[in-house]
Image (cartoon, rainbow, N blue to C red):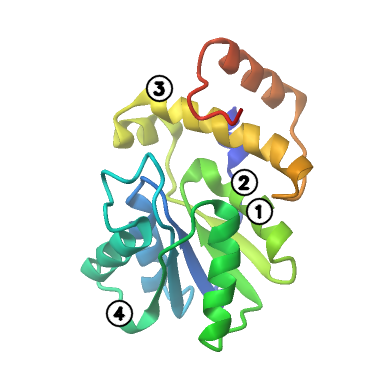
Amino acid sequence: MIWDYHLMGHAVRPVDVGIGLGSHDLGVAATAAALYHRGLFPVLVFTGGNSPTTQARFPRGEAVHFREHALSLGVPDSAILVEPDAANTGENITRTRALLARAGIEPASVMLVCKPYMERRSFATARKFWPEVEIVCASEPMELDDYVRSIGDAKLVVDMLVGDLQRVIEYPKLGFAVEQDVPDDVHAAYEALVRDGFTSRLIV
């Protein structure tokens, strides 16, 4: 239920810029590359420094490793911009916006490419910090069970689902995102998982 809630259900369509949000999941870079090859955007930005969950896997930073993976998948270097310093989703948006402005690019529409369960939070964050652009969210199309198998750690995935939902609920109060409606059954599922100990990604 929470997995489905996180998905925005946007139909992908051509936009001015694609933005690959850095994370532990290299599948985001592969998905962004595939969308580029479909002709859905002419410019692809990878954004992200490091977090405790990515430092060991991507020692040179998330965006740098994502770029290298996209290059290996045939995306031309001339189409890629790298924002290597963002430490959170808000900075992913604001730093990417500034990078594009320095490059003389002022998009009317962007596609946020991210982990499946990060779609709603990234959408809410972008609407807060970049309200004038049209936002389309995209992620690798897969079911929860398939995603768990791809990551190899069911507890970690559920912890992250719960953590992202907490941020969807709490971040608007802190000025980090626009508010999203959370249905009662989704909220009840969230509270049940917290009681069951899926708490390692919660903010205190």
Q: Quadrant of the N terminus?
A: top right
Query: Do the residues bearing badges 3 and 1 touch, measured as CB atoms within 8 Å?
Result: no
Q: Which residue is mark 2?
A: 121
Name the residue type under label 3. Answer: Lys
Q: Secondary structure at mark 1?
A: helix
Front-lying residue, 8 or 51: 51
Name the residue type under label 2. Answer: Arg
Taking the image as drawn, is residue 180 in sight?
no
Q: Which residue is mark 4?
A: 77
- Determine the residue positioned at 55% across, 67% down: 95
Name the residue type under label 4. Answer: Asp
Name the residue type under label 1. Answer: Thr
Q: Which residue is mark 3?
A: 155
Q: Quadrant of the C terminus?
A: top right
Query: Do the residues bearing badges 4 and 1 touch, measured as CB atoms within 8 Å?
Result: no
Q: Is residue 100 above or below residue 172?
A: below
Q: CA distance from mark 4 to mark 2?
A: 29 Å
Q: Dot 1, crowdedness within 10 Å: few (<14), some or many (≥20)? A: many
